[in-house]
Image (cartoon, rainbow, N blue to C red):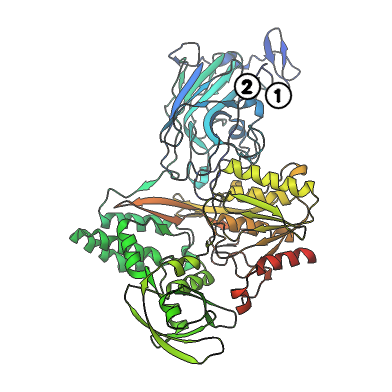
Amino acid sequence: MRFKRLALLLIAASALSWACNGLTQAANTLEISDGLPTAEGGEPSAAQADFPPAPIQNDEGGPVTITGEVVYTNPFFTAGVAQPLVILEDQAGFIDRDEGFIMPPESQTLGQITSDFYTSPFTYSIALPIEPQGTLRDVDNDGESDTGLMVFAVAYWTNAFGDPFLEQRDLGGGGWSTAYASTRVSEDAATENEVIGGKLLVYAVDDRQGFPTSFGEDGLLFTGDDPVVALPQGYTVVDLDTDPFTFDRSREPVIDLIEPEDSALVDFSGLSYTDAFDGMVEMMSKKYAFTELKNIDWDALNDQYRPRFVDADVMGDSRAYQLALRDFLWEIPDGHIDFTFTDEMNSEFVTEAGSGLGMAIRDVDDGRVLVNYLVEGGPAAQAGIKLGAEIVELNGQPIDEVVDATRPWSGPFSTAHIRRLQQLRYSIRFPIGTEVEVTFQNPGGASQTVTLTAVPETESLNISSFYAGETGYELPIEYEILPKGYGYVKVYSFFDNELLTIQLWERMIQTMNDYSVSGLIVDMRQNGGGNGFLADQMAAYFFDEVLEVGNTGYYDESLDDFYFDTRTVGYFYPPAPDLRYGGGVAVIVGPACASACEFFSYDMTIEDRAAIVGFYPSAGLGGSVEVFNMPDGITVRYTIGRAVDADGNIHIEGRGVVPTVRVPFTEEALFSEGDLELDAAIAALGSR
């Protein structure tokens, strides 16, 4: 099904058109007799003879070409898209209320995108086939078996898997579009995804087929209480936003695609600081996914921070507003929470954390905090601090207390282990010129105390980044065969060009199979996430059957609560057998494995498919996100999707994917020139 919410767990799909001939569908087993379609094995149907003809507007013989535009405000709309398409979408899935309906390839008519896709709005054009090959459905609900009609929506998709046609994986499992289509659907739980407006394109094989003129008393389309009229042969555009419906036979109708309210960008940027804060709190208090899990008291946060926004308004002080916003967001312990840095925030960062002592520190399993990096010629090195020195105190305070009290600029965090690692990084960052008394003990030496002065240097901060060593030029998938004969693949992102990502992934799988590689190591240690559906389907290459992987709930206004639609349960959809890998698998995780990366890694724990290896669990970011605009050019990101496993349990948020093979983080590991996690993954493959 096409999900309506675009986020880092974005789901989209696409297809290429098919030039079609013939009127019949194998699924309907129609025959031709005396020029009239007949029901299966029967006489020509006369059921429609009693239907009044549809009142037609602009009768020019029916559409030949459809044009329109697609407006999008959601910033994730173009993320990872390589093959954006606008197609005729067979609506048999909606008519049948079949969420698993897969549009037949022959029904998929491809349009042309006629302007820059990356600039909203973009335009499209579809040249209609003379005889489309959609799925015939009898929608007059008169109890008779009739030839039926082909019903289409116009919809945006993107293709990533297999050939250019939409398949089950491209369709997110099947169904019908609920976003960026010519139809508009309900967002209420009781009628979730029911078509409630917009436009349909209908093709009648003759002039004897009935179609509804309204939603009827039940407010639902294609149900027994719908009044019906007979449509003329050929194409007709049906406008569902009028009562009764309007039937248009223009030669070149314009049909724009609709961005749903839940997918559109929420924009508070034109409001005062206080009004924007009020709007933000009202929205987040409802839609934030983990209020109960995190024990967030929105009323208390409102009382604490609103006065700062009011003061910023009164003073016209953008800096005060931005600091208030930063501090408010840092109160929410969720690693998905983020905001854009303005020049003012960059300046604040430089002031507060842009200077250091010329060293980086880490703690090890035995509780010691050790110096693991020294800037050549920096304050720490000049004062005689050596690599491996234990830091005991800063300014007379035990180092653990200092670390625990540190509020990192990289916050907030979903898990304690990520917070601790980032606190270690920032606990030795100070405003320039700050004098810091450091008590330390060099390896084999006695305790001593020196005074260091913070200098402008970011080298020690950058070297301790979770993403240290990345160049930014990496492909999303890079792989090799290790000297021991095992395969090794590093997945850098699920947010890159999705078509390229799948092509590289399948080539990697083919290489492993061609060379009969018995074990594969999947390195996820520097993967910040992206498209969660893509991540799930890449994990499916290691399985032989469709498996449930979980679901995601969202706030529903009609319920005033979170709602898990049973029709949006996530599944693996394994590829063709020759693209599956059956050897042993070890997945290496770490603090920089976040969001979609964690969904892939969790998927590999299903049926104990892989060993999960690492010093630490993953980041613990277990949901999908959306963004909104605030004043002064700031965009805020927060979590709206509550992801759960197949049993309905929150499984990633706040805990991450925990290694089944935990590698001790000792002093040896801290200073090893090798890769102990990789060594452990190789050993794990040998034992599976």
Amino acid beneath label 2: Gly
The answer to whether one can see residue 688 in this image is: no
**Residue 129 versus residue 527 in the image, above or below:** above
Amino acid beneath label 1: Asn
Give the quarter of the image for residue 614.
bottom right
Give the quarter of the image for residue 129.
top right
Q: Which numbered tag is attached to residue 28?
A: 1
The structure residue drawn at horizontal position 40% and vertical position 45%, both measured from the top left corner, is 265
Give the quarter of the image for residue 672.
bottom right
Mark 2 and mark 1 in contact (Cβ < 8 Å)?
A: yes
Q: Which numbered tag is attached to residue 557?
A: none
Q: Is residue 498 left or right of residue 605?
A: left
Which residue is more in the foreground, 356 or 398? 356
Under tag 2, what secondary structure?
Answer: loop
The structure residue drawn at horizontal position 29% and vertical position 52%, both measured from the top left corner, is 632
Mark 1 neighbour density, 10 Å: few (under 14) some (14–19) many (20 or more): some
Residue 243 in the image: state x and y as whole percent. 42, 27
Residue 154 in the image: state x and y as whole percent. 52, 29
Quarter of the C terminus within the rendering: bottom right
Real-space Cα separation, disc 1 to disc 2, in angstroms: 10 Å
> What residue would you read off at disc 2?
148
Under tag 1, what secondary structure?
Answer: loop
Mark 2 neighbour density, 10 Å: few (under 14) some (14–19) many (20 or more): many
Name the residue furthest left.
Answer: 315
Name the residue furthest bottom.
Answer: 446
Residue 18 in the image: state x and y as whole percent. 63, 24
**Residue 295 versus residue 153 in the image, above or below:** below
Which residue is more in the foreground, 495 or 304? 495
